Image: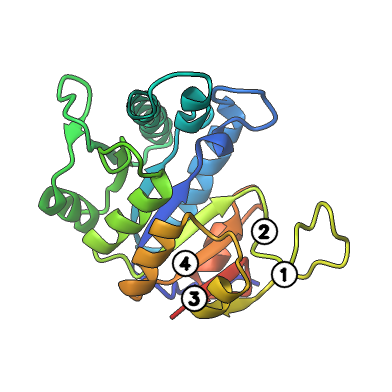
Amino acid sequence: MTASKPRYKRILLKLSGEALMGDAAYGIHPPTLGNIVAEIGSVLALGMEIGVVIGGGNIFRGMAGAASGMDRATADYVGMLATVMNAMALSDAMRQANIEARVQSALNIEQVVEPYIRGKAIRYLEAGRVVIFGAGTGNPFFTTDTAAALRGAEIGAEIVLKATKVDGIYTADPKKDKQATRFEKISFNEAIAQNLAVMDSTAFALCRDQKLPINVFSIFKPGALKRVVCGENEGTLVYC
């Protein structure tokens, strides 16, 4: 049974663009988007403050563009714009679910969404609104994992929750190794020593240096997000 009292007050949720695809090959799958919004709403109802960083891999992935001959910086900027599209779609889905949300972009496109302003984002959070951060860090060569670590530190989040397709960090790839076991908890130093792919190295180092824990869990498990924030054994906690 899920505890009713959350362990944290303010969290940063990292959603991959692929999480919005569901079983589709690309784009946004509306029922999947609706399920994600419902999960976020269940946590918001506990009185939590939620920031979201969203990726753009369901629309465009910078590395893939670079590999096909596009200039890497240009490809990354296209990827940033894809994250803004996802952020707007997520915000609209929240509006339909009667959840107040604001989108802030690291790129200046004020005709569409607000620019990222740290103080304003914090005021939104304190007022109970979900803040969705688009366009990554606003710079090429940095992933949305790094944006999640950066925004999490900036807004004073107590933890970064990385929502994936896998329900935690395993000793090996659970799809390839049936003997793989899930870590309930693991320290940053142990994760580095075992070369576990938690987040990209820049994001991981930033979280470690800022003493910002990470919890990796599956966004597709009903109620998993709520169990994580209530301190239950869900996913894998990476701690300092």
At x 35%, y 58%, the residue is: 149
Q: Which residue is mark 3?
A: 188
x, y percent for residue 30: 56, 26
Q: Earlier in the sequence, mark 1 or mark 3?
A: 1
Q: Point out the tag, 4 or 1, that comes first from the N-terminus.
A: 1
- Quadrant of the frame with the N terminus: bottom right
Image disc number at residue 131: none
Helix, strand or loop for disc 4:
strand
Left or right of residue 170, residue 126 in this image: left
* Residue ID for mark 1: 182
Disc 2: CA contacts within 10 A as few (<14), some (14-19) or many (>=20)? some
Please state which amino acid type lies under the numbered disc 4: Ile
Which mark is first along the chain, 2 or 4? 2
Query: In the picture provided, is 193 more to the left or to the right than 87?
Result: right
Q: Which residue is mark 2?
A: 167
| CB-based contact (under 8 Å), mark 1 and mark 2 | yes
Q: Amino acid at mark 1?
A: Arg
Q: Does any portion of residue 45 appear in the rendered image?
A: no
- SS of the residue under disc 3: helix
Marks 4 and 3, Cα distance to the nearest angstrom?
9 Å
For marks 1 and 2, give the CA distance.
8 Å
Which residue is identified by label 4? 214
